[in-house]
Image (spheres, rainbow, N blue to C red):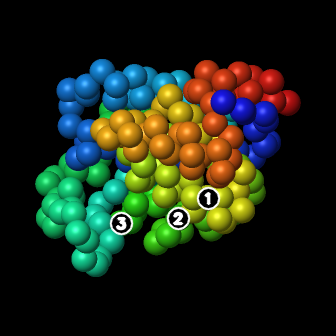
Amino acid sequence: MTLTTLDRNTALLVVDLQKGILAPPLPPPVAAVAERTRALLDAFRARRLPVVLINAAGVAPGRTEQPRRVPATLPEGFADFLPELGQQPDDIVVTKFTWGAFATTDLDARLKALSVTQVVVTGVATGTGVEATARQAYEAGYNVSLAVDAMFDPRAEAHAYSVANVFPRLGETGTADEIVALLDKAP
């Protein structure tokens, strides 16, 4: 864990914490992720920093060897955010149809319009939506921080691999509490 600083214009990106992916009641690891994410949300909102809630409402086209987990027709409420997030009117909502939140959305343009230079990424699943979004943010030129205790992957090995091998190459990693502490130190 090597968090050093947060830029003055940092946004929080919350990936796929939605009902269709995480059907309530939440299992204990996901409930803890939602709780830590809520702490980050509260801290960012209190400082009037941008909060981006990202949901998935489909999948990219193309053949895959593994069956897709998202059905072709989504049930009602699939893309609704978990109530634990306490969605606010000022939150930016981005709906994606790929793993990453930048590839087929206007997220980059919206962040640049707000002069955002850094993003903090949380959510599910660590090895897919979170990692893809972090990669795309890094490739778009943002400083990236990853709240590793505010993310979850049902594949424990995917979570561990992303945290140990991928994330340190994309940015800095730390805990939700460490990120809040850095926010508290910011001018």
| Residue 26 % position (x, y) | 25, 27
- Identify the residue shown where x is 66% and y is 24%: 178
Cα separation between marks 3 and 2 = 10 Å
| Residue 7 % position (x, y) | 78, 43
Which residue type does callout 2 highlight? Phe
Which residue type does callout 1 highlight? Ala
Residues at circles 3 and 2 in contact by the CB criterion of under 8 Å:
no
Q: Which residue bears the numbered disc 2? A: 102
Q: Which residue bears the numbered disc 1? A: 137
Q: Earlier in the sequence, mark 3 or mark 1?
A: 3
The disc label shown at residue 91, or none: none
The answer to whether 97 appears left or right of 123 in the picture is left
| Residue 140 % position (x, y) | 66, 65
Taking 173 as reference, is 95 above or below it? below
Which residue type does callout 3 highlight? Phe
- Within 10 Å of disc 2 (Cα), the crowding (few <14, some 14-19, many 20+) is many
Q: Nearer the viewer, residue 6 or 52?
A: 6
